[in-house]
Image (cartoon, rainbow, N blue to C red):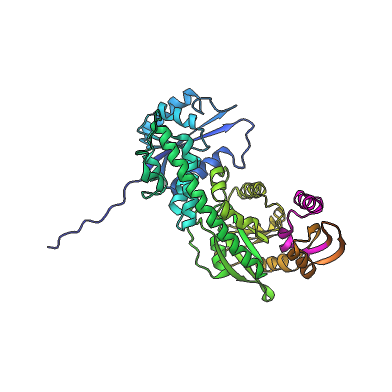
């Protein structure tokens, strides 16, 4: 009789209990119930099972525990009943709130906030050196003000052993009268400085790469959108690429660029960027600066919207707000209303295209509408001209030549510090003249230097 070989078993998933708070006059793009549903998806992506949820409406967060004392007692009881190991708050908790809640709930249950959860997901999905550096930096900067003692857990949270900060452990560094916490914080600050230096090298490499692309004169298109809107699926369809795709939040983090053929024999370079989400942690925006530069340097933004989602318009507005905060308002936008194949009536998506800027209803999965989308992109990049009036210093000879070569010049006035140019240029080139608009601060500073 053959002996049965035991098969490896998957460890059971931890249970998480969700907490959502609606603060009076604090506006978010998603209602509290929908925001908690999104938090549940984030928890699932992180490998957690949701055991229940608790909500509260407040004029302002409680000074000690964020939620009121009575809700803390109720939360503790519900967590014990459901045997949850993790409590997830839908907002970012201050270090004090997190510390007081942890003391009230007990050390056997971890209290985490939305930011910590997103950081954990990013750590799971970062595969390139750049992605791992960015996630690690965001984690260290998030946890630094939250240290209360030994921080060996941080090394595990930041992606496992081998970290520079973990290798010091604070051993042998303590000076007279210095506490272990101070030693730990100093070690982490050193690690943060090291990570920033490494990311500066990455940023410099990206800048050189972008400069090469600009010299090729092939326009770039950045795919942006809410997480899980289908950007990677769309890029795979139109560029015959092999970008990783999964039906989960933040499936891909690292930017991928592919060459795309447009109608009429034209070409473009399309870059898939990290998906956005409401309440995007500030630490992530700062850490992913090098990656987000891909958006700011693009000639055109392709905003992919999951039109089958019940909060499609809210998600669209959330992304637009983030783009505005990043300083991308000046870049032309084309909208792809994606996933029409999931609608009961696909024609209904075409009826709402007027609500979105330059929108086309498509399915990145089946390819429906993609040909029309590519035609619109080609038109925006190569046929649509935008009025512009700039004052360029003579040192910006490349931009002056570009205006003459690609634009329709209506006025040229040479002055002491530079040249005033007015006319129309292809929409894809507008971003390159950003900051040189007549009357712009960058132009005025340059002119003052010239006059001096």
Task: Identify which residue is drawn at 47% across, 41% down.
Answer: 189
Q: Main secondary structure of the magenta part?
A: helix
Task: Identify which residue is drawn at 59% across, 31% down.
Answer: 23
Task: Identify which residue is drawn at 52% across, 53% down.
Answer: 199
Q: Is residue 345 above or below residue 212?
A: above
Place of residue 363 in the rendered image (x, y in percent of width and height, measured from the top left):
59, 63
Inspect the magenta stretch and tell me whether residue 220 lies in it. no
Q: Which residues are magenta?
A: 423-452
Q: Quadrant of residue 280?
A: top right
Quarter of the image that includes the N terminus: bottom left
Left or right side of 327 for 62: left
Place of residue 78 in the rendered image (x, y in percent of width and height, measured from the top left):
41, 31
Q: Nearer the viewer, residue 185 or 244?
A: 185
Q: Quadrant of residue 182?
A: top left
Place of residue 168 in the rendered image (x, y in percent of width and height, measured from the top left):
37, 43
Task: Identify which residue is drawn at 57% across, 63% down.
Answer: 234
Q: Nearer the viewer, residue 209 or 64?
A: 209
Left or right side of 293 for 11: left
Place of residue 3 in the rendered image (x, y in percent of width and height, measured from the top left):
15, 60
Inspect the magenta stretch and tell me whether residue 440 lies in it. yes
Asked whether the viewer can see residue 369, the reply is no
Q: Residue lying furthest left in this view?
A: 1
Q: Nearer the viewer, residue 451 or 245?
A: 451
């Amino acid at each position: 009789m053959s002996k049965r070989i035991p098969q490896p078993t998957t460890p059971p998933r931890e249970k998480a209990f969700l907490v959502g708070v609606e603060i009076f006059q604090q506006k978010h793009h998603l209602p509290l119930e929908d925001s908690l549903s999104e938090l549940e998806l984030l928890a699932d992506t992180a490998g957690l099972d949701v055991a229940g949820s608790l909500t509260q409406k407040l004029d302002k967060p409680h000074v000690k525990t964020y939620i009121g004392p009575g809700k803390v007692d109720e939360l503790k009881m519900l967590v014990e009943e459901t045997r949850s190991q993790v409590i997830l708050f839908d907002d970012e908790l201050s270090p004090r709130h997190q510390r007081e809640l942890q003391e009230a709930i007990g050390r056997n249950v971890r209290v985490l906030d939305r930011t910590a959860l997103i950081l954990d997901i990013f750590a799971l999905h970062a595969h390139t050196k750049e992605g791992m550096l960015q996630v690690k930096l965001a984690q260290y900067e998030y946890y630094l003000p939250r240290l209360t003692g030994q921080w060996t857990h941080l090394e595990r949270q930041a992606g496992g052993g081998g970290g520079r900060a973990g290798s010091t452990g604070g051993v042998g560094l303590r000076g007279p009268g210095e506490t272990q916490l101070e030693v730990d914080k100093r070690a982490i600050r050193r690690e943060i400085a090291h990570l920033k230096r490494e990311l500066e090298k990455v940023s410099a490499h990206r800048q050189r790469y972008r400069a090469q692309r600009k010299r090729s004169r092939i326009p770039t298109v950045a795919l942006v959108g809410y997480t899980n809107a289908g950007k990677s699926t769309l890029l795979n369809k139109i560029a015959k690429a092999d970008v990783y795709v999964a039906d989960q939040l933040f499936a891909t983090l690292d930017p991928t660029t592919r060459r795309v053929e447009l109608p009429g024999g034209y070409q473009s370079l399309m870059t898939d960027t990290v998906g956005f989400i409401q309440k995007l942690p500030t630490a992530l925006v700062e850490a992913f600066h090098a990656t987000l530069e891909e958006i700011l340097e693009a000639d055109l933004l392709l905003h992919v919207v999951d039109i089958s989602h019940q909060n499609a318009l809210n998600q669209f507005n959330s992304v637009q707000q983030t783009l505005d905060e990043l300083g991308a308002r000046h870049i032309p936008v084309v909208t792809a209303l994606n996933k029409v194949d999931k609608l009961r009536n696909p024609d209904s998506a075409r009826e709402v295209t007027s609500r979105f800027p330059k929108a086309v209803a498509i399915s990145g999965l089946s390819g429906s509408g993609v040909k029309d989308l590519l035609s619109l992109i080609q038109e925006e990049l190569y046929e649509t001209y935008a009025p512009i009036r700039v004052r360029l210093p003579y040192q910006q000879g490349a931009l002056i030549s570009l205006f003459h070569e690609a634009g329709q010049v209506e006025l040229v006035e040479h002055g002491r510090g530079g040249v005033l140019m007015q006319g129309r240029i292809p929409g894809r080139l507008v971003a390159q003249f950003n900051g040189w608009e007549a009357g712009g601060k960058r132009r005025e500073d340059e002119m003052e230097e010239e006059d001096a």
